[in-house]
Image (cartoon, rainbow, N blue to C red):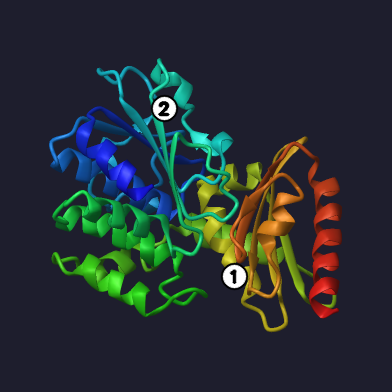
């Protein structure tokens, strides 16, 4: 499908680029990389998020161009490009706001993605969606600029955990080298990502660790936050997506989980695994999805009820891998 998408982007004009709710580095890097590349190719394009742009990625070129919501965009788009979005209902802002139904292009690396687009480019074994964006742009004959490379490299760095997560291969480092080749300063990016963190993130992490429980003989590390914690601290909701990684770092832990209460009847769960357990399988049984080592759930079930179900599913998964 990459050839079909490359041809569509080359032949058409007028694009809306979107990603998922609570975007991470891969989502933001993919969104900005695609937006800037299309505009450099002389295309008319806009990018939009469902909420304010995450300040942790404000150092990236193009960040000031991203819209919040889809108001009047001044043209009739030929295509909506959804990047790094596992399921149609996680696309934000709602693409129904663009008016008449344009072609929907789905670019993603989540194994649970059902292929909801009119044209789909899904590769579950890719390290990041930015990898797929890079391959697509190369297929179009695009000459990588420093700005686009910086955005795509940010997505690769964040989704590989600075190249420490499983699935990193020699091809991953070859891609990193290609993204650095236009003149990108790797430390400039990693310093912005990991050494210039807001105090709110550290405060949020401390609160998460204070509430940490070790369950199932220490194999499940589980903690919780609520929306009022975020408001009181002044933290963005997507900051929980990075601190949850701390929960799987303890020896003996197989799964780390962070439950965040949004209202009395809704919550979100972020799950991380060292790899023996497939947390995307666990999440899918609770209405979520993701990757084997990183998955999430958005649920209208009360947090306590969801917590009980989650523990049961993790326990069952542990029994299955031990059998």
Please state which of the two labelled residues, at mark 2 or mark 1, is closer to the viewer: 2
Q: How many marks?
A: 2
In percent of width and height, residue 73 lies at: 29, 21
Q: At numbered mark 2, what does the secondary structure look like: helix, strand or loop?
A: loop
Could you tell me residue 160's position as x and y percent? Answer: 44, 68
Residue closer to the observer: 257 or 116: 116
Most extreme residue toward the bottom is 251
| Image vertical order of residue 53 relative to residue 282, above or below | above
Residue at position x 31%, y 68% in the image: 191
Looking at the rendered image, the quarter that the C terminus falls into is: bottom right
**Crowding near pointer 1: few (<14 within 10 Å), some, many (20+)?**
some
Image coordinates of residue 10 in percent, x first then y, are: 21, 38
User: In the rendered image, which quarter is residue 205 located in?
Assistant: bottom right
- Badge number at residue 219: none
Real-space Cα separation, disc 2 to disc 1, in angstroms: 32 Å
Q: Which residue is mark 2?
A: 69
Name the residue nearer the viewer: 277 or 111: 111
Q: Which residue is mark 1?
A: 246
Residue 227 falls in image quadrant:
top right
Identify the residue at image location x=18%, y=38%: 39
Residue displayed at 24% across by 73% down: 177
Image location (x, y in percent) of residue 78 = 31, 25
Horizontal relation, residue 300 to residue 247: left or right: right
In the image, taking residue 72 as reference, residue 225 lies left or right, namely: right
Judge by depth and name the residue closer to the eye, 64 or 228.
64
Q: Residues within 10 Å of mark 2 (few under 14, many from 20)?
A: some
Task: Name the element at disc 1.
Answer: helix
Q: Earlier in the sequence, mark 2 or mark 1?
A: 2
- Closer to us: 134 or 303: 134
Q: Residue 131's image quarter?
A: bottom left
């Amino acid at each position: 499908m990459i050839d079909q998408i490359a041809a569509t982007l080359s032949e058409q004009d007028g694009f809306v680029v979107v990603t998922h709710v609570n975007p991470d580095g891969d989502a933001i890097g993919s969104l900005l990389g695609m937006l800037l590349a299309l505009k450099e190719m002389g295309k008319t394009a806009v990018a939009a998020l469902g909420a304010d742009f995450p300040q942790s990625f404000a150092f990236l070129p193009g960040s000031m161009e991203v819209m919040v919501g889809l108001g009047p965009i001044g043209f009739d788009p030929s295509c909506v490009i959804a990047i790094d979005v596992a399921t149609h209902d996680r696309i934000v802002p709602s693409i129904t706001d663009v008016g008449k139904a344009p072609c929907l292009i789905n670019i993603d690396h989540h194994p649970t993605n059902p292929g909801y687009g009119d044209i789909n480019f899904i590769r579950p074994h890719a390290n990041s969606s930015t990898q797929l964006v890079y391959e697509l742009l190369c297929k179009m004959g695009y000459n990588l600029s420093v700005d686009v490379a910086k955005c795509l490299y940010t997505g690769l760095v964040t989704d590989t955990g600075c190249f420490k997560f499983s699935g990193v291969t020699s091809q991953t480092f070859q891609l990193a080298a290609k993204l650095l080749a236009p003149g990108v300063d790797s430390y400039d990016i990693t310093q912005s990502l990991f050494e210039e963190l807001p105090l709110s993130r550290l405060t949020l992490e401390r609160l998460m660790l204070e509430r940490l429980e070790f369950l199932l003989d220490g194999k499940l590390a589980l903690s919780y936050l609520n929306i009022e914690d975020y408001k009181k601290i002044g933290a963005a909701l997507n900051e929980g997506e990075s601190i949850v990684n701390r929960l799987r770092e303890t020896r003996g832990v197989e799964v780390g989980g962070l439950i965040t209460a949004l209202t009395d009847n809704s919550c979100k769960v972020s799950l991380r695994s060292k790899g023996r357990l497939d947390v995307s399988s666990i999440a899918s049984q609770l209405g979520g999805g993701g990757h084997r080592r990183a998955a999430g759930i958005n649920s209208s079930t009360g947090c306590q009820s969801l917590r009980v179900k989650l523990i049961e599913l993790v326990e069952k998964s542990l029994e299955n891998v031990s059998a």
